[in-house]
Image (cartoon, rainbow, N blue to C red):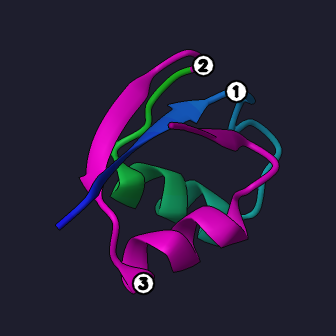
Amino acid sequence: MAKIKIKQIRSICSKTPNQIKNMEALGLRKIGHVVEKEDTPQIRGMIKKVDFMVEIIE
């Protein structure tokens, strides 16, 4: 399956607990951190919930 790279571009400070848990589930910890994940509907859903804090690197 295809892989996607996800980069954190904003801090999780002052965000809702649900958004913080999504960022932790994606494996993102600090600004500038990049992780590589499988491109599944579940991962895409988590990215959609925190799309203002992350960017997809193609």
Work out which quarter of the rendered image holds the N terminus and state it.
bottom left
Q: Quadrant of residue 32?
A: top right
The amino acid marked with disc number 3 is: Pro
* Precedes in sequence: disc 1 or disc 2: 1
The amino acid marked with disc number 1 is: Ile
Q: Residue at x 75, y 63 (%)?
A: 16
Q: Residue at x 41, y 70 (%)?
A: 43
The amino acid marked with disc number 2 is: Ile
* Precedes in sequence: disc 3 or disc 1: 1
Residue 31, label in figure: 2
Residue occupied by mark 1: 9
Q: Residue furthest left?
A: 1
**Distance from Cα at disc 3 to Cα at disc 2:** 24 Å
Q: Residue furthest bottom?
A: 41
Secondary structure at badge 3 equals helix
**Distance from Cα at disc 3 to Cα at disc 1:** 22 Å
Q: Residue at x 36, y 59 (%)?
A: 25
Residue occupied by mark 3: 41
The x, y position of residue 2, in whole percent, is 25, 60
Circles 3 and 1, Cβ within 8 Å, touching? The answer is no
Residue bounds of the magenta highlight: 31-58
Circles 1 and 2, Cβ within 8 Å, touching? The answer is yes
The x, y position of residue 22, in whole percent, is 51, 63
Instruction: Looking at the picture, tell me which residue is in the foreground, 58 or 16.
Output: 58
